[in-house]
Image (tube, rainbow, N blue to C red):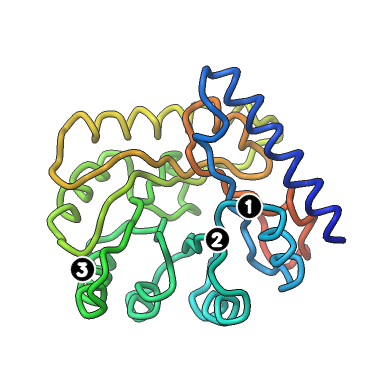
Amino acid sequence: MTENAIRRNVEDIRRRIGAAAARAGRRADDVRLMAVTKTVDDQRIIAAIAAGVDIVGENYVQEAKRKIELMGRPREWHFIGHLQTNKAKYAVKLFDMIHSVDRTDVALELNRRAAKEERLIKILIEVNISGEATKRGIDATGAPGLTKEVSRLEHLSIQGLMTMAPWFDDPEAARPCFASLRSLRDRIADAGIPGVTMRELSMGMSGDFEIAVEEGATIVRVGRSLFGERPASSISHQP
């Protein structure tokens, strides 16, 4: 895919975000566009950065390290994959936000490593809002308790919630998941947990980001609609 094609895709996605935001009485600039770069070659990522995506989202710590060394930091880099505790020491150095905190042990290790780096790390609590066995994240009933636990860690700053909806042929079918995450976010915010800022909802991918925006997404994670189809062997559900 050419640089011009990627630029056109960014423009089209932003237009669709703007239209979805307008339908919900929101501002388009309340929603940030993340380029999901798993399996995407360097030149296409560089083109997406040049086209003005807001965030680069990476699934693997070591791959992000290589890309950041090559491309620098003209945009924020967010970690969106499953984080193993032994990668926490690298994650706190590399990323502006970590979307996938769903366990106390991961939070504790991130906090310990962030303390050594003298950094305050922005994180999202990952919620398995659909209850699917194949999805990662804490269940909705456990999310408030985990949020309260993690809020006590002085080197982590909870910014909101993240989820991945099930794959549906009809994007409208994902709406209840996004509405449920927004409702959960609002309940946690109303609890007034010290140090917790529930401003972010990371939800919505290529097939359903417009519905997610209508339901309150502040970050949409887009790969396929931006970069084109990936190899069939790479993933079964493409962002």
Instruction: Kindly indicate whether the residue at mark 1 contacts the one at mark 3 (C-beta within 8 angstroms).
Output: no
Instruction: Kindly indicate whether the residue at mark 1 contacts the one at mark 2 (C-beta within 8 angstroms).
Output: yes
**Residue 144 in the figure: left or right of residue 85:** left
In the rendered view, tell whether residue 215 sits above or below residue 55: above
Name the kind of residue labelled 1 in the image.
Val
The alpha-carbon separation of the residues under discs 3 and 1 comes to 31 Å
Name the kind of residue labelled 2 in the image.
Arg
Q: Position of residue 71 (x, y in %)?
A: 62, 74
- Label 1 element class: loop
Q: Which residue is mark 2?
A: 75
- Label 2 element class: loop
Mark 3 surroundings within 10 Å by alpha-carbon count, few (fewer than 14), some (14 through 19), many (20 or more): some
- Label 3 element class: helix
Write down the quadrant of residue 213 in the picture: top right
**Residue in the picture at 50% in, 54% down:** 134
**Residue 133 in the figure: left or right of residue 186:** right
Say whether residue 1 is visible: no
Q: Which residue is mark 1?
A: 53
In-front residue for pair 217/133: 217
Residue 108 image label: 3
In the rendered view, tell whether residue 167 sits above or below residue 100: above
Instruction: Kindly indicate whether the residue at mark 3 contacts the one at mark 2 (C-beta within 8 angstroms).
Output: no
In the rendered view, tell whether residue 216 sits above or below residue 198: above
**Residue 185 in the figure: left or right of residue 50:** left
Name the kind of residue labelled 3 in the image.
Leu
The alpha-carbon separation of the residues under discs 2 and 3 comes to 27 Å
